[in-house]
Image (spheres, grey):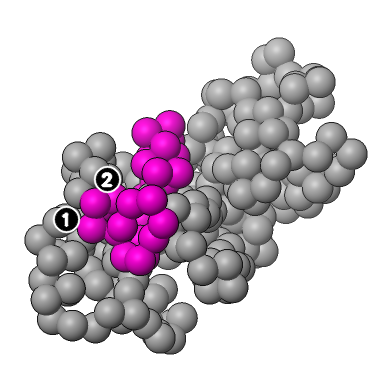
Amino acid sequence: MRVLLVEDEPKLAAFIHKALTEDAFSVVTARDGETALELARSASYDIVILDIMLPRMDGFAVCQAMRALHPDVPILMLSARGMIEDRVRGLDTGADDYLTKPFALSELTARMRALLRRQPTAALKVLTVADLTLDPVRRLVTRGGRQLDLTQKELALLEYLMRNAGQVLTRAMIAEQVWDVTWDRLTNVNDVFINHLRKKLEESGEPRLIHAVRGVGYVMRSDDEGACA
């Protein structure tokens, strides 16, 4: 599940980002409203977590513009302003839910999952590549009926690969979309996680699904035609 987190307070943004990433969400963070809208125009997200008090554009304006771009994406507003007028305004501008700061992380994730369950979108459907399936809501992965025990980071990586099956994904794309970091050519973090994932997917001798494209990145497909490794 891809999350767009719009929060200008660095410590809170880092806290939410870390917690959601550990829960297998793929999180992209924006620190102001204009950046958030740029990200929303260039990619799709399964849910948006939006603070109201933002530089450049406030959350109400961002919410209205976001709703015009993506009418069906759930938006959860965050604010230290607990006045009923603010809640009503947030909901009227297009938010699906409103959470007042300070809040428990468990409540944030519970509200996120509740919003996601209501969405009749392709993002919630079980993903399938050959005999591999991934249920993004239940966080359940099976191959040939065998349930796989994946770490949260492995799960986030696998979901990104499966949602883009057949498409060659560069190492930079994987770093930015899964880890929300700028790719460093000197690091092999992508390759390490790919290798861990491959071992679990092929533990019982199943055919390879994640193929390397030399000098570029990786592609997930159900056959090895044109694959380099």
Residue that badge 1 annotates = 94
Q: Is residue 196 visible?
A: yes
Give whichever of 221, 193 is nearer the camera. Answer: 193
Cβ atoms under marks 1 and 2 closer than 8 Å? yes
Separation (CA) of disc 1 from disc 2: 8 Å
Q: Quadrant of the C terminus?
A: top right
Q: In the image, what residue occupies the spot 32% across and 74% down?
A: 79
Residue that badge 2 annotates = 66
Q: In the image, what residue occupies the spot 22% across and 69% down?
A: 97
- The picture places residue 156, in percent across and down from the top left corner, at 58, 53
Three-letter amino acid code at disc 1? Gly
Q: Quick check: 41 above or below 100? A: above
Q: Quick check: 119 above or below 110? A: above
SS for callout 1: loop
Three-letter amino acid code at disc 2? Met
Q: In the image, what residue occupies the spot 59% across and 73% down?
A: 11
Q: Quadrant of residue 74?
A: bottom left
- The picture places residue 52, in percent across and down from the top left corner, at 32, 65
- The answer to whether 199 appears left or right of 115 in the picture is right
Give whichever of 179, 39 is nearer the camera. Answer: 39
- The picture places residue 205, in percent across and down from the top left corner, at 75, 43
SS for callout 2: helix
- The answer to whether 78 appears left or right of 42 in the picture is left
